[in-house]
Image: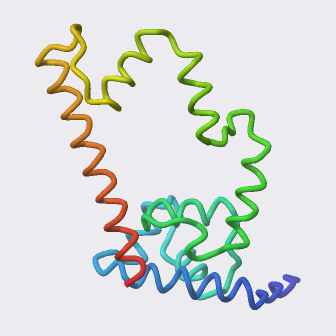
């Protein structure tokens, strides 16, 4: 005999409501298409998560966040805390601070420090030719596009 599912906590229901609101803003995306992109066997699993029938977990939350272009914290602060706790034990976890950046700069080979100085100070050292300037300009344009895209997505989430 199958035991009834444990009811969701109010916090889990609120997470599902927030996730559903984010999904609802994705006008072109259907539950079936999202299920396919998330690797679920059918649309039913997406529906159950969105309607608070089954609780979100770290794996599902990360998948939803990735496909809906949002952060896990946008719909589940508690799962985000769990992810942050897990990541704090990662061997690759590095907090980026000015101190860490300075340490990395000082330890970097001289040629890397020269490139960073060129970019930051917009100087014209002898080794920089027109190709190098064009390449750096192209990198800056790419970075700016990426930053603007992220800001645009963040503003859409707030709307």
Taking the image as shown, residue 62 lies to the left or right of residue 21, namely right
Q: Which part of the image, by quadrant, shows the N terminus?
A: bottom right
Query: In the rendering, at what x and y percent does residue 132 appear?
Result: 19, 19
Q: Which part of the image, by quadrant, shows the C terminus?
A: bottom left
Relative to residue 93, is residue 112 depicted above or below? above
Q: Nearer the viewer, residue 101 or 10?
A: 101
Query: In the rendering, at what x and y percent does residue 21 appear?
Result: 48, 86
Q: Residue at x 65, y 59 (%)?
A: 59
Report the coloring of the rendering.
Answer: rainbow
Q: Nearer the viewer, residue 73 or 38?
A: 73
Relative to residue 135, is residue 62 depicted above or below? below
Taking the image as shown, residue 110 lies to the left or right of residue 72, namely left
Taking the image as shown, residue 102 lies to the left or right of residue 83, namely left
Query: In the rendering, at what x and y percent does residue 52 appear?
Result: 64, 86
Q: Residue at x 55, y 74 (%)?
A: 74
Q: Residue at x 66, y 42 (%)?
A: 95
Query: In the rendering, at what x and y percent does residue 87 appear?
Result: 72, 48
Q: How many marks?
A: 0
Relative to residue 120, is residue 147 depicted above or below? below
Q: Residue furthest left?
A: 130
Q: Nearer the viewer, residue 14 or 140?
A: 140
Q: Residue at x 71, y 56 (%)?
A: 84
């Amino acid at each position: 005999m199958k035991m009834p599912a444990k009811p969701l906590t109010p916090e889990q229901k609120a997470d599902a409501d927030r996730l559903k609101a984010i999904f609802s803003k994705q006008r072109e995306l259907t539950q079936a298409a999202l299920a396919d992109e998330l690797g679920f066997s059918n649309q039913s699993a997406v529906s159950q998560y969105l309607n608070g029938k089954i609780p979100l977990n770290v794996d599902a939350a990360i998948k939803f966040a990735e496909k809906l272009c949002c952060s896990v914290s946008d719909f589940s602060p508690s799962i985000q805390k769990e992810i942050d706790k897990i990541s704090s034990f990662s061997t690759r976890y590095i907090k980026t601070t000015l101190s860490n950046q300075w340490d990395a700069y000082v330890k970097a080979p001289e040629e890397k420090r020269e490139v960073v100085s060129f970019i930051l100070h917009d100087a014209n050292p002898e080794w920089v030719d027109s190709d190098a300037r064009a390449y750096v300009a192209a990198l800056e344009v790419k970075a700016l596009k990426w930053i603007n895209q992220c800001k645009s997505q963040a503003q859409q989430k707030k709307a």
